[in-house]
Each structure stands twice: as structure tokens, then as C-alpha cells.
Image: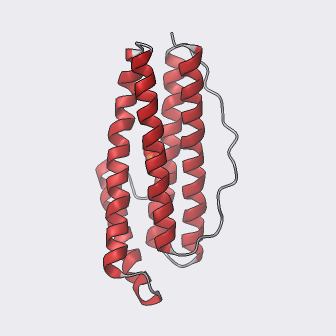
Amino acid sequence: MISDKMQKELNGQIALEGYASYLYLSMASWCRHQGLEGCARFLYRQSDEERMHMLKIFDYLDEVDGRALAPAIKQPPQDFESVRSLFEQVYAHEQKVSTSINKLVTKSLKEDDHSTYNFLQWYVEEQREEEALMRTILDKIRLIGDGPQSLYYIDKEVEAINAQAAAAEGGQGA
Ligand code: OFO
């Protein structure tokens, strides 16, 4: 059993994860169009991951006799100023998601809803990992520089990071 309030909050998180999936999809397409194949592969995989995060909440709500609602997704941006600004936006979005998860954790404790509290711990860990991953990419971009001569090297670095992340998940790397 889950309270109406907590059900509503989790549906809000569904919408946020769904938006992240579409945002990264849009970014992946932009990268591919710029010839940044490594960045595109990384973002397509991240997009799939975000969809998986969304579906995990669908399953949980079903398990606790709640109702998951397919969200309305607003159109994400289609164009990006640079690869650096794109990854800055990814990092900012991950921070926003972490804040939202932390608020949900606090609410679950206030309601004595230990089942939801336990469920959310997976997301707490996931957000820590994702923020660290995006910071690693931004650090590389800062080190390499993001002028036109650097794009090839940035793309290779992100491709390597993507291969590592995919291997850690036991996946293929989009
Ligand atoms: Fe859903 O993990 Fe990032 O946002």
C-alpha cells in the first residue's frame, strides 16, 4: 500500500526520468550530427538508462498497489552551443534529479513509508555515480579544451568512458 501523496510524488519522478531520457536522446542526435560519434553513443546509452529508471518506478508502483502514469514530456532543446555547454547541461540536470530524489527520501521517512525509502536508496546511489561520471567528462573537456582542434580528442575520451560504463553495466555501449 502506498499513500496518494507518495504515489503522486513518484509519478512526478517518473516525469523527470522520462524527460531526462528525451533530453539525452536529443543531445545524442545533435552530437551525431556534429560527427561526435563517441559522445552520441554515450548519450544514447544514458537515454536508455533514464528510461529504465522511469520503468523501475512503474514496476514499484504496481507492486505497492499504486498507479503509474505515463508522463507528458515537454520538448527538450534541439540545439546546443558547444559540447562543453551540452555536458554542463547534463550535469545540471543530474543535480536536479539528485535533489528531487533526496526530497522523496525525506518525504518517505516523514510518512514512515520504509518500503519507498528502501526502494529509493538504489536511486541515491545511482545519482552519486551519475554525477561523478558527468564531472569526469567535464574535467576532461576542461583539460583538453573545447576548441575545434580538441573535439576529436574529447570524442575519443567520451567514447572510452562510454565503453567503461557499458562494461560495468554488462551492456554493449549503445
Ligand atoms: Fe535517472 O539517473 Fe540520471 O537522471
Residue in the foreground of this view, choosing between 41 and 89:
89
Please say if 10 is above or below 52.
above
Provide residue 26's location: percent of width, then percent of height. 61, 61
Please say if 99 is above or below 33.
above
Q: How many marks?
A: 0
Among the 4 quarters of the image, the one containing residue 25: bottom right
Residue in the foreground of this view, choosing between 143 and 70:
143
Among the 4 quarters of the image, the one containing residue 123: top left
Q: Is residue 37 left or right of residue 14?
A: left
Please say if 6 is above or below 103.
above
Determine the residue positioned at 50% across, 14% down. Answer: 64
Determine the residue positioned at 53% across, 20% down. Answer: 6
Provide residue 125's location: percent of width, then percent of height. 32, 39
Provide residue 161's location: percent of width, then percent of height. 33, 64
Provide residue 77's location: percent of width, then percent of height. 65, 61
Q: Is residue 114 left or right of residue 89?
A: left
Among the 4 quarters of the image, the one containing residue 126: top left
**Extreme residue toward the bottom, this view:** 149
Specify whether residue 170 is in view.
no
Determine the residue positioned at 41% across, 75% down. Answer: 155
Determine the residue positioned at 38% across, 22% down. Answer: 117
Residue in the foreground of this view, choosing between 95 and 30:
95
Which scheme is used to colour this image of the protein? secondary structure
Specify whether residue 6 is in view.
yes
